[in-house]
Amino acid sequence: MDTQAESTLTIQTLPSYEMRSYRRKVKSIAIWSISFAALTFVMFIILDILLSVISKGVPGLSYNLIATQTSGIAGGLQNAILGTLLLIALSALISAPLGILAGIYIALYAPKRFGAVIRFFSEVLAGIPSIVIGYFGYMVMVLQWGMGFSALAGGISLSIIILPYIVRTTDASFRQIPKSYLEGAIALGMTPLMAMRTVLLKLATPGILTGVLLAVSIALGETAPLIYTAGWSNFDPNLQLVKNPVAYLTYVVWTYLNEPYHSAHQLAYTAALLLVMIVLVLHVLVRMLQRGSSKHA
């Protein structure tokens, strides 16, 4: 009791500036401790997911897995891998030009209020659940437009999901460029369009590509919209983009884990591993582009 009373008396008699310094140190230690605990928790979850996927997916990796089509709940994943690449390529080809052009318009040419309206609706579109977009794709593209379950219907659905992310990153990339760059280019005799194409676009390209790659990684993890639009097929995809169902890796993960067979579980774990590997490669590319962007800044 005497020791506690002496320590309390000592703190109370400290000068005001020393008291404030003491409180700041206590708050700093508390904040850093909470941040470290949160980081440790997040890292534990990430490592647990990665180790689980790797430990269960690696035993199924083989050449036959990549070179063999799925047969029921067995076989390989060649059709799912090719179908995933086709769907991602279609979604990127549709959404990237639209998103980049929309982002350029919002950042450079749109009136302030109109640009704010477009940004708002872009954020609303990004928040719509993917299963709602899948239902929309089923009702409109599969049934009304007569596409049937097909790669094109699935690619359009994915493009709707990732479009707002490309718009947002393109807009942000151009808005981060100092206005003096544009003003200097115009002062040298360039037209606004020429200045945008030769000066601003070059500086914004790393950020734009970063947004496209991040959007593609988001599309890789989607299942719900593809169930309604792409269907499923045990055969490799071809150039018939309508009325021709296509396979994809997320369907294998979502469906085959519910089967009571070891072969189906192994395919699901290996498909999950392949998805993680693709996403990791995309994020490595994103980091490389971000470093290139910081060098230009």
Image: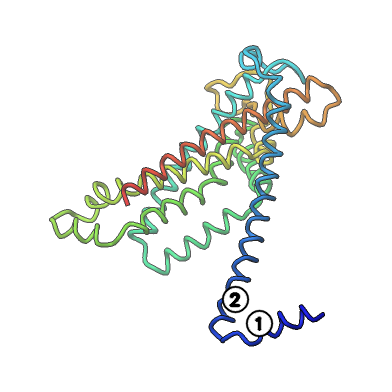
Q: Residue furthest front?
A: 2
Residue at coordinates 67% horizontally, 27% vertically from top-left?
A: 271
Looking at the rendering, in which quadrant would you find the N terminus? bottom right
Choose between 212 and 137: the one closer to the eye.
Answer: 212
Total numbered circles: 2
For label 2, the residue is 22
Q: Relative to 53, say whether 9 is above or below.
A: below
Label 1 sits on a secondary structure element that is helix
| Marks 2 and 1, how far apart at CA | 9 Å
Q: Identify the amino acid type marked 2.
A: Tyr
Q: Relative to 84, say whether 160 is above or below.
A: below
Horizontally, residue 177 falls left or right of residue 81, namely: left
The reply to whether dot 2 and dot 1 touch (C-beta < 8 Å) is yes
Instruction: Point out residue 116 in the picture as x, y percentages from the top left corner.
Output: 45, 66
Depth check, mark 2 against mark 1: the one in front is: 1
Residue at coordinates 19% horizontally, 59% vertically from top-left?
A: 184
Classify residue 141 by image quadrant.
Answer: top right
Q: Relative to 276, say whether 17 is above or below.
A: below
Mark 1 neighbour density, 10 Å: few (under 14) some (14–19) many (20 or more):
few
In the image, which disc is placed on residue 248? none
For label 1, the residue is 11
Residue at coordinates 65% horizontally, 29% vertically from top-left?
A: 273
Q: Earlier in the sequence, mark 2 or mark 1?
A: 1
Q: Identify the amino acid type marked 1.
A: Ile
Instruction: Point out residue 115 in the picture as x, y percentages from the top left corner.
Output: 42, 63
Instruction: Point out residue 3 in the picture as x, y percentages from the top left corner.
Output: 77, 78
Horizontally, residue 172 falls left or right of residue 161, namely: left
Label 2 sits on a secondary structure element that is helix
Classify residue 134 by image quadrant.
Answer: top right
Residue at coordinates 21% horizontally, 61% vertically from top-left?
A: 183
Choose between 1 and 88: the one closer to the eye.
Answer: 1
